Each structure stands twice: as structure tokens, then as C-alpha cells.
Amino acid sequence: MEGPWRVRREQDGADEEEGRALEETWRPWPKTRRRIRGCLECVKHQLFRVGDDWYFLFALGVIMSLISFAMDFTVSRVTNAHNWLYHELGDYLVLKYLSWTMYPIALSAFSTGFAQSITPHSGGSGIPELKTILTGVILEEYLTIKNFGAKVVGLTCTLACGSTIFLGKVGPFVHLSSMIAAYLGRIRTSVAGEYEVSKPVYSALAALLLSSITFPPSLGQFMASRLSMKELLSSLLDNQTWSVLSQNASLTSPPNVDPQNLWLEWWHPSITVFGCLAFFLVMKFWMLILATTMPMPAGYFMPVFVYGAAIGRLVGETVAFLFPEGIQSEGVTNSITPGGYALAGAAAFSGAVTHTLSTALLAFEITGQIAHILPVILAVLIANAIAQKCQPSFYDGTIIVKKLPYLPRIRNGHYILHQLQSLNLV
């Protein structure tokens, strides 16, 4: 029975080749098309002589840079529109409150609802899931284009909320890059399991609470609520001493944010800069914890970095107040720079939260100089030693909470372990 079927298959294959040859003959300009096809094959051969990985990485970089530019452009436009509406309302306090609160409520609710309706895996930063994938566990739908679209739209809405929600984009953008890389490499993942789809109502209520607290005419005036995330970091790294500048009796609160004097957002006639920084730290501590529970695409590294900078700034301003003339060492007077303390605090606190040492390098890249290399590295090492001794990192904790496959950290060696023999273990 196999002989006739084999002959039939060979005959069908010959008929298909004959049909393709006839179709090729009847198409216009066959010689020209063959030459063009040959040229394209030659170009392809020459291009891929260096390997296709370079073109893969080039395409990945171009795509992600375009997405980042489009996202930042959209966020800037939406934020400017919100600021324009807020200032155009004039002295109508109720309308200004509604414009200040309804804006992040609508964006956060839409971010949560849209992202969760597409896929429940788009919430959060995505870094814990990536760490799980890198350990060899395959997770379903975490690297799909569907999740990519939901995360792009949701993250854009989250960033458009400004510093009210106090969330960033670093972690989600790493996740987005991984999804594009997985799509370009045609990676397919599959594993069973889903998580409960959170409702956008929770995000809206949390956004209402956070935006009400940061409303500038109320408590927001004591915590620089009008500044964006980038402006918060720029102001905290300022090399001027705020406690000295605030002694000027002619200071007045500007009606709008002054880009040249961002430190004025940390000054209030009825409270010192120390009180504003302390109030910012107390309030943002629980507000950041609340914001991380909102099931929408968001990054957590930048808020932690800014929070650490605020801690360092408070310490630096306190030291500058106690030693207004500077600290003398070997006959040389060294002036106090609170911005340096803020830089060390940002690197140390973010490094302690993530259990990484690379935050010190990030701090040097932000400032563009290494004048504070020793205190920054020392602060990061001490903070990491204490944090790793007490608890897992933020991302490992998220993996544990989400009940993802988790490899526990290997315990440090002890000199007693080297004295053990195989006989003692039997």
C-alpha cells in the first residue's frame, strides 16, 4: 500500500513545482525580479555575516527609545493640561480641589481597569516576575504582546498622575523591554495559574485619599506636592543650604512652581524646612506603602530613591545647622553640602530596599561626578548589610506574597561548618 501513495505524493509535488514554474513564467519581468531577488539575498548574506544578534539589539533599542519618548511626551502634555486647568480656576477652592483630586482618580481607575481587563498580570513593576523567569520558571502571559499593550497604557496613566500617587517607571520599563525582546525572539511561555482580578474601585479610593492629602492649599503645602517626581529629586540634590536661604525675611511663596528656585516648595512661613522634610518623610512613608498595593502598572524604584534623598537631605540640613561654619579637619574647614547627604541617602535607602550595590553607580551617573564616592559607597554597603540581615528585598518579598516560585537566599558560611565531616551528617 505504501508504493502507490508514495508515487501519488511525488506526482503531487511535481505538479506543484510545475504550477509555480508556470506562474513564475507568466509574471511580468521575470529576469528583473530574479536579479532583484539575487541582490536582496546577497545583501542579506552580507548583513548577517556579523550575526543577527546585533540587529536584534538595535531593533530593541530603537523600539524602546521610541516608546519611551512617546510615553514621556504624552505624560508631559497631560500634566501641563492639568496644571493649566488648576491655575485657571483662580480662587475657587472647591473647584481647585475637585480638579486636583478627580484627575488622579480618573487616571488611576482607568489604568487599573484597562490593564486588568486585558490581563491580570500587568499590575505592579514586573521585576519580581522577571526574577522568577530568570531562575528557569516559565510564567504564562508575562511576556506577551497583550500584556505589553496593557502595561504601556496603564503605565502612561500612572505617570500622568504625577507625584500625587508617588510611583515611577523604572521597573515597568525593564519589564516592557523584556516583553519586546521576548516577542522579537519568538519566545513562548506557558504555565498554569491566575491571580484575582482587582477592581478599579480600590485604586480610585486610594487615589482619592492620596490626592486629598497632597492638595496644595491643605497638607500638600507642607510636603512640596506641586513638584513632579523629577523636580522632587532635583530639588533634594540642590547644593544650596535651605536653612540659610530660608532666613531671608523677604521670602514669599510663589503662585506657581519656579524652576530656578525649587527649594521654595519646601519652605513655608509657618514651618521651617526641617518640619517640611520631616512631614514629607512621615506622610510619604505610609502613602508609598498604600500606593504599592494599587493593582496598576507602576515602578517602585524611583519613589524609594526620592524618599532616601529626603532622608539624606534632612540629615544634611541638620548637620549644616549645627555646624554653620563647616567642620574643621587638620586646620582645613570643610563646608557642609546637604545635597551630598541627599545623594548618599538616596543610594543607601534604595540599595537597602532592593539589596543591590549598583545604586551607588546610579547616583554617580545622576550627578555626573564622583566627589562623594567614598561616603556614598560606604553608606550603600552599611545599608545593604543591615537590610540583608533583617529581611528579603522588596522584589523577593513581592515574589513571596504573590506565591511565585522562589529560591531562598543561601545562608552565609560559618567557620563551624568547615569543621563538619561527612561522618557527622550520616
Image: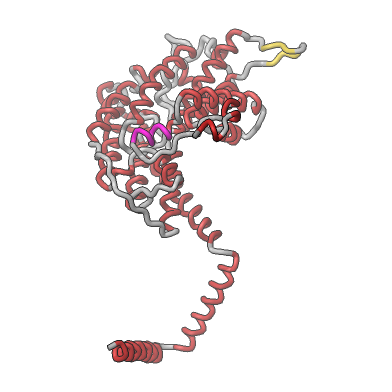
Q: Quadrant of residue 216?
A: top left
Q: Nearest the camera: 322 or 196?
A: 196
Image spot of residue 303 (x, y percent): 44, 30
* Residue 260 visible to an observer of this rendering: no
Q: From this view, report whether residue 139 is shown above or below residue 170.
A: below
Image spot of residue 52 (x, y percent): 53, 63
Is residue 400 rendered magenta in the image?
yes
Is residue 81 rendered magenta in the image?
no
According to the image, what is the colour scheme of the structure?
A: secondary structure
Q: From this view, report whether residue 88 is shown above or below residue 141.
A: above
Residue found 49% across the figure and 80% down from its top: 37
Q: Nearest the camera: 237 or 18?
A: 18
Q: From this view, report whether residue 154 is shown above or below residue 54.
A: above
Q: Quadrant of the N terminus?
A: bottom left
Q: Quadrant of residue 221?
A: top left
Q: Outermost residue, right direction?
A: 331
Left or right for 5, reference 323: left
* Residue 383 visible to an observer of this rendering: yes
Residue found 47% across the figure and 11% down from its top: 272
Q: Which residues are magenta?
A: 395-402
Image spot of residue 168 (x, y percent): 42, 35
Left or right for 288, reference 196: right
Which secondary structure type mostly characterizes the magenta part of the structure?
Answer: helix
Image spot of residue 357 (x, y percent): 56, 32
